[in-house]
Image (cartoon, coloured by chain):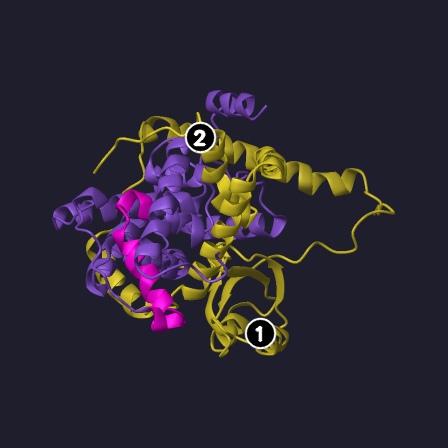
Chain colours: A purple, B yellow
Amino acid sequence: MLMNWIQRKKTTRPAASPEDAGGSAPSERAGEAAEMALFEGVRQGRQKSFEALYRLYHPRLQRFLLHMIRQGDAVVEEVLNDTMMVVWRRADAFDGRSRLSTWIFGIAYRKALKALSRMDLPVDDADLPESPDPAPGPESRAGFVQLRGRLQQAMNELSVDHRAVIELCYFHDMSHGEIADVVGCPPETVKTRMFYARRRLRALLEDLGGHLPGEM
Amino acid sequence: MSNVVVPIETDPHQFVQALLPWFARGSLQEDDAAMVREHLLHCAACRAELGAERSLQAALADCAEERAADTEAALGRMRALMANNPPAPQPAQGKGRWMPWALGLQSAAIAALLLVVVARPALEPVAPYKGLSAAPTAPPRPEALVMFRPGAAEPAIRKALLAHRAVIVGGPTESGAYRLSLPGGAPALAALRAEPAVSLAESLDPVAQP
């Protein structure tokens, strides 16, 4: 039965839409309508609308780009402002087939890839050296600071493709259809990347000092 | 960048495990979620994987770095960039040809509408009618978008809303913003913006925006 379902899924590719992720709650739709009201102002060239939209998206884009680019604040802000400049200058390019947030994150993702290639930084974990052993020692394994450090190091070891799906799913609550729209690949590819990203993340965490809390 | 993606659709366990991040968050479409649930009933390995997924998500959530975003400073630099990059002009294909006709038709339509509206009361007085199920008043009009500071306590938020007769009518958005009905207009918006619990308050009324 499961295999039949898998076959059916392969032939009926789900489209990313506002109804994806199990359907939007009414309050969420109302919130999206509010963001769209601001975006309509951006389309008409109203700077105040743009600034309100900038304030809404700055914290989320900053977090996303920090983890994607792994560079200092100045580089992240440059990429973020490049992204929002596209929103300001090319608002007419948004055709409404996806969520506004998906469109904006898609621009940010492509800008991040360009920045990485411009800086000649590795975008694939195949180019990365093996993780250096931080050797926290069993006596210091527990503890919030160590765990945060291990997680950050493990995330940094992932390829940019894998980091993107982890980041967008876990920290921006996007469905696989929305992530597919952001990174420009089929939803099946997103699931495959997620499968290998999780496997790699857990292997890295074990290498870096043991299991997660609650994990046997 | 490697573009080689090894397909996982042929292995039901891998297929289910690939969906577990969204399943654990409750954000999977219902038909997918139903099939994952059914598979988990019979598969101890995937159930263990779900447990590990929940641990991973809990650890990631606990360790998510709360970084204070200096939005206003970044916006200041953005303004300088925008000063040199005005928005691209809207496409105006064939504008010169159809615009006079469209304006003429629009004027005619407005004149006809005015005639109906002005002349009709004189010809047939309309008795006021109110249905039993009619709403007594129109729903409050959303007029502002607001974000509260991270960690702002509920009493502080409530106090700020009550002080300016603001009512939450929508949200939160993915960005954590709420829609407000704000009868006090621009003065109330300015006062709301100054509230300690509020990090952003912007008008949604296009007329109020330059």
- Report the residue marked by disc 1: B157
> How busy is the neighbourhood of tag 1: few (under 14 within 10 Å), some, or many (20 plus)?
some
Q: Main secondary structure of the magenta part?
A: helix
The spot of residue A11 in percent (x, y) is: 48, 20
B200, B88: nearer the viewer: B200
The spot of residue A35 in percent (x, y) is: 47, 52
Q: Residue at x 68, y 41 (%)?
A: B117
Q: Amino acid at mark 1?
A: Ile
Q: Nearer the viewer, mark 1 or mark 2?
A: 1
Q: Amino acid at mark 2?
A: Ala
Residue A70 placement, left or right of A209: left
- Report the residue marked by disc 2: B102
What chain letter is assigned to the residue under label 2?
B
A20, B141: nearer the viewer: A20
Specify start and end residues of the magenta stretch as a single range. Answer: A138-163
The spot of residue A102 in percent (x, y) is: 41, 44
What chain letter is assigned to the residue under label 1?
B
